[in-house]
């Protein structure tokens, strides 16, 4: 008589052990901590990116995600006769990357990723703006990062306009896009358990933007 094998059944304890093993593999790139609020520069509209503007992103590590932000940046929005003729220019200090882990941040500044030494500035310059629905636009532009220049579109919902405490007029936007690391020569990776790549192929970029009409805001 041929013995009958029972199918394997995953227990909660076994699943917990496997999950713990994956987390230990991800720990090679450090733990994530909450960073400080970003410091923006307030300018005119035509003007800069307002205080409280966040330039950040999310990169997938194995089965989880790590959030990061850039602490130093500047920008300008020039309003044309029509929305389509308006333009945006932004610059980010690549070395100001902050994911809450100094070891990981140093690696991100290296030639494996941002290559911040020879390429200290990440820049974006718009080339056009097209409507994508009610209070929603697609911003077309060119992104230069780690020495590579690529055309990048941003999904740009308009969130509204209101006065600020200094007598200026503040307009809020949210911009979202997704980048492929290999498009910017960031091919570094490691393989953890079961052939899972430590670092995902894509990076989700999220920007909370406040454009403020007028000159520089009062110093805090």
Image (cartoon, rainbow, N blue to C red):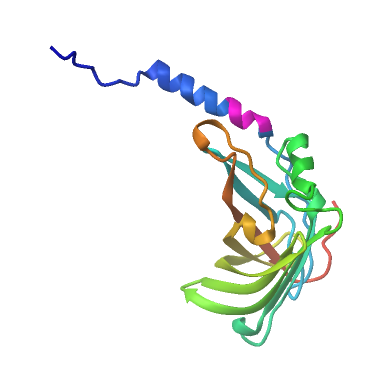
Nearer to the camera, 38 or 192: 192
On screen, residue 172 above or below 105:
below
In the displayed orientation, state which residue is furthest to the front.
1
> Residue drawn at (60%, 62%), measured in percent from left and top?
175
Total number of numbered discs in the rendering? 0
Camera-side residue of 139 and 106: 106
Q: Is residue 188 left or right of residue 109?
A: left
Tell me the residue at 69%/78% (across/down): 87
Query: Residue at left 83%, top 59%?
Result: 119
* Placement of the N terminus among the 4 image quadrants: top left
- Given residues 149 and 127, the one toward you in this image is 149
Q: Is residue 86 magenta?
A: no
Q: Is residue 63 left or right of residue 91?
A: left
Q: Where residue 8 appears, x then y in whole percent?
A: 30, 20
Toward which corner of the image does residue 92 lie, by quadrant?
A: bottom right
Percent position (x, y) of residue 95? 81, 50
Please state the extent of the stretch shown in magenta in the rendering: 24-28
Q: Height in image: 62 above or below 47?
A: above
The residue positioned farthest toward the bottom in the image shown: 81
Q: Quadrant of residue 212?
A: bottom right
**Magenta portion: prevailing SS class:** helix
Q: Position of residue 149 (x, y in %)?
A: 71, 68
Residue 54: x and y in percent read 68, 53
Hey, which quadrant is residue 105 in on the image?
Answer: top right
In the rendered image, residue 25 lying in the magenta stretch gets the answer yes
């Amino acid at each position: 008589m041929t013995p009958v094998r029972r199918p394997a059944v995953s227990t909660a304890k076994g699943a917990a052990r496997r999950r713990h093993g994956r987390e230990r593999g991800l720990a090679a790139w450090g733990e994530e901590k909450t960073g400080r609020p970003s410091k923006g520069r307030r300018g005119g509209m035509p003007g800069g990116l307002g205080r409280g503007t966040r330039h950040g992103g999310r990169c997938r590590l194995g089965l989880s995600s790590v959030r990061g932000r850039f602490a130093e940046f500047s920008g300008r929005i020039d309003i044309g006769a029509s929305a389509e003729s308006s333009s945006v220019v932004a610059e980010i200090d690549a070395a100001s990357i902050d994911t809450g882990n100094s070891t990981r941040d140093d690696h991100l500044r290296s030639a494996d990723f941002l290559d911040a030494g020879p390429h200290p500035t990440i820049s974006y310059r718009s080339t056009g703006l097209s409507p994508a629905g009610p209070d929603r636009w697609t911003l077309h532009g060119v992104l230069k990062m780690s020495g590579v220049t690529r055309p990048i579109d941003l999904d740009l919902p308009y969130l509204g306009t209101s006065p600020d405490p200094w007598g200026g007029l503040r307009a809020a936007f949210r911009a979202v896009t997704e980048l492929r690391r290999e498009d910017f020569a960031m091919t570094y990776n490691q393989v953890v358990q079961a052939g899972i790549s430590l670092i995902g192929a894509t990076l989700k970029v999220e920007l909370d933007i406040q454009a403020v009409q007028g000159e520089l805001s009062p110093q805090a």
